[in-house]
Image: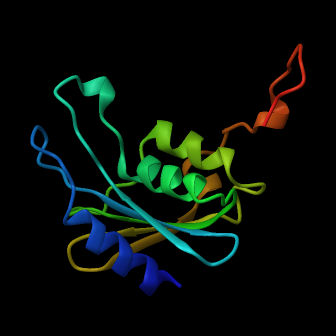
Amino acid sequence: MPDDLIAAAREVRAHAYAPYSGYKVGAAICDENGAIWAGTNMENVSYGATICAERAAVLAMISAGARSIQALTVVTEDGGAPCGICLQVLREFTDDPARLKIFLVDGKGLIGEMTLADLLPRGFASAEVPRTESPSQ
């Protein structure tokens, strides 16, 4: 599976829109059905409007109706890991962060394999957040 994810992330990384940082990122997610969803980063002059590749891939997956991430590959020039916001978004779509594999790839190839729990040891799930009303889907 990592080879398919790496190929998808490499391919989409070529389409990154990163005119401000020059830091192109491609991400690919494998969902619960084995489908692969890819996304790339899209910067904006209003930096808060920038979308990370990992979240773009999650949005593609959600838009297609899938709801569970099994694995993620991130391709950058230097093997960078997902940011904190992306890690918490990934947590939203896994029941077990210790089982969600994350593969980091640099310009030469796979440099690291870890889990979401490794990168976000104290992330929290929706079920852990107290609510005064029942959540709607």
Q: Residue at x 59, y 49 (%)?
A: 90
Q: Residue at x 58, y 75 (%)?
A: 35
Residue 23 image position (x, y, % from top left) = 18, 50
Q: Is residue 33 above or below residue 74?
A: below
Q: Is residue 11 left or right of residue 99?
A: left
Q: Is residue 117 left or right of residue 17?
A: right
Q: Is residue 123 above or below residue 13?
A: above
Q: How many marks?
A: 0
Q: Is residue 62 above or below residue 103?
A: above
Residue 36 image position (x, y, % from top left) = 51, 73
Q: Is residue 22 left or right of residue 69?
A: left
Q: Residue furthest front?
A: 64
Q: Where the C terminus falls, by quadrant? A: top right
Q: Considering depth in this image, is 78 or 23 the residue closer to the camera?
A: 23
- Which of the 4 image quadrants contains residue 27? bottom left
Q: Considering depth in this image, is 29 or 74 the residue closer to the camera?
A: 29
Colour option used:
rainbow
Q: Residue at x 29, y 49 (%)?
A: 41
Residue 130 image position (x, y, % from top left) = 85, 21
Residue 54 image position (x, y, % from top left) = 43, 52
Q: Is residue 41 left or right of residue 117?
A: left
- Which of the 4 image quadrants contains residue 25? bottom left
